[in-house]
Structure formats: C-alpha cells, structure tokens
C-alpha cells in the first residue's frame, strides 16, 4: 500500500533554513502531483507548494522563500524552506494526487489522496 514518509523539520531561528523530505513507497500507483500543506495551531490546513504536469505553484506567503523539488527516480519530494519567519511555524504535511484529471488544482486539499504523517517546523523570533 502506498505510503508517504516524511523527514526533516525541527526548530530554527528566524531567517534560517530547513529542508523537508517526503518519500513515497509501497505502491506502483502513478503520482501526478506532489505537494506540501501546513497547519498552524487553531488554523485550517493551507496549501504551501506543489509540483506536477502543470508546473510548480506556491502560496503567495512563501513565494521566493520556499522551493519545491521532486526526484522522480526515488519517488521523493522536497521542500526547501529559506528565510524562515515565526509565522511559518506549523506542522507540514506532504501529499500526492493519484487520480488522472484533465486539470489539476494544486491547492485543492480534497484532490490529494495520500498524506504524510506531518512534521513540526518551529521558527523562533
């Protein structure tokens, strides 16, 4: 059964950097989109970044600071977090879309079929 296993995260000072990894394993399902979401305490889970056939997309709040990359050979997606701010503090989740669609909406949480376990990112001021 397809699973997503996350690694990375932790505590960093404001202005610092982190890298999150998410490896897909245990299945042969085709993956069309790989993305990242985050959820801060008391807030809804929100879109951060995604990559797929339609290219790459970022939330405005992280654009120019975060970079998503994908290693298809290893079924892994990365999120490079730079110039971190205290408001970036959240649990970060990777997710994938495995259904074929004519159009892919990267920020539609309900379109993602599999989710990672989440990893905490804490940015101190």
Image (cartoon, grey):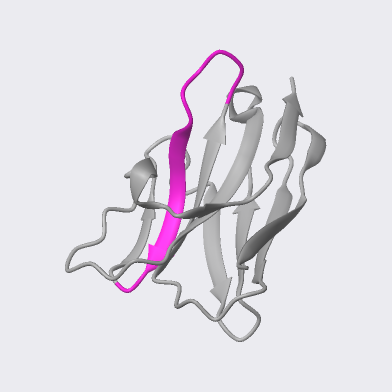
98 relative to 121, above or below: below
Task: Identify the residue at horizontal 50%, vertical 18% (top origin).
Answer: 43
Which quadrant holds the C terminus? top right
Coordinates of residue 36 in the picture (x, y in percent): 52, 49
Task: Identify the residue at horizontal 43%, vertical 40% (top origin).
Answer: 47
Observer-nearest of 31 and 85: 31
User: Among all residues in the image, which is located at the extreme front?
Assistant: 1
Res. 84 in view? no
Observer-nearest of 81 and 75: 75
Observer-nearest of 58 and 65: 58
Coordinates of residue 26 in the picture (x, y in percent): 67, 74
Coordinates of residue 109 in the picture (x, y in percent): 38, 42
Task: Identify the residue at horizontal 48%, vertical 30% (top origin).
Answer: 45
Question: In the figure, is residue 26 to the left or right of 106?
Answer: right
Asked if residue 64 is among those painted magenta in the image, a careful observer would answer no
Res. 78 in view? yes
Observer-nearest of 78 and 31: 31
User: Among all residues in the image, which is located at the extreme top?
Assistant: 42
Question: In the figure, is residue 103 to the left or right of 77?
Answer: left
Q: Quadrant of residue 5?
A: bottom right
Q: How many marks?
A: 0
11 relative to 34, above or below: above
Which quadrant holds the N terminus? bottom right
Q: Quadrant of residue 77?
A: bottom right
Asked if residue 49 is among those painted magenta in the image, a careful observer would answer yes
Coordinates of residue 15 in the picture (x, y in percent): 69, 36
The residues colored magenta run: 40-53
User: Among all residues in the image, which is located at the extreme left?
Assistant: 102
Task: Identify the residue at horizontal 36%, vertical 55% (top origin).
Answer: 57
């Amino acid at each position: 059964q397809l699973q997503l296993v996350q690694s990375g995260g932790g505590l960093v000072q404001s202005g610092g950097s982190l890298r999150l990894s998410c490896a897909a394993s245990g299945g042969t399902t085709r993956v069309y989109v790989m993305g990242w979401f985050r959820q801060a305490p008391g807030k809804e889970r929100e879109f951060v970044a995604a990559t797929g056939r339609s290219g790459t997309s970022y939330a405005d709040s992280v654009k120019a600071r975060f970079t998503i990359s994908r290693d298809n050979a290893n079924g892994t997606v990365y999120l490079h977090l730079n110039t971190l701010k205290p408001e970036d503090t959240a649990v970060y989740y990777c997710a994938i879309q495995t259904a074929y669609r004519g159009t892919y909406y990267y920020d539609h949480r309900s379109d993602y079929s599999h989710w990672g376990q989440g990893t905490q990112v804490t940015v101190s001021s």
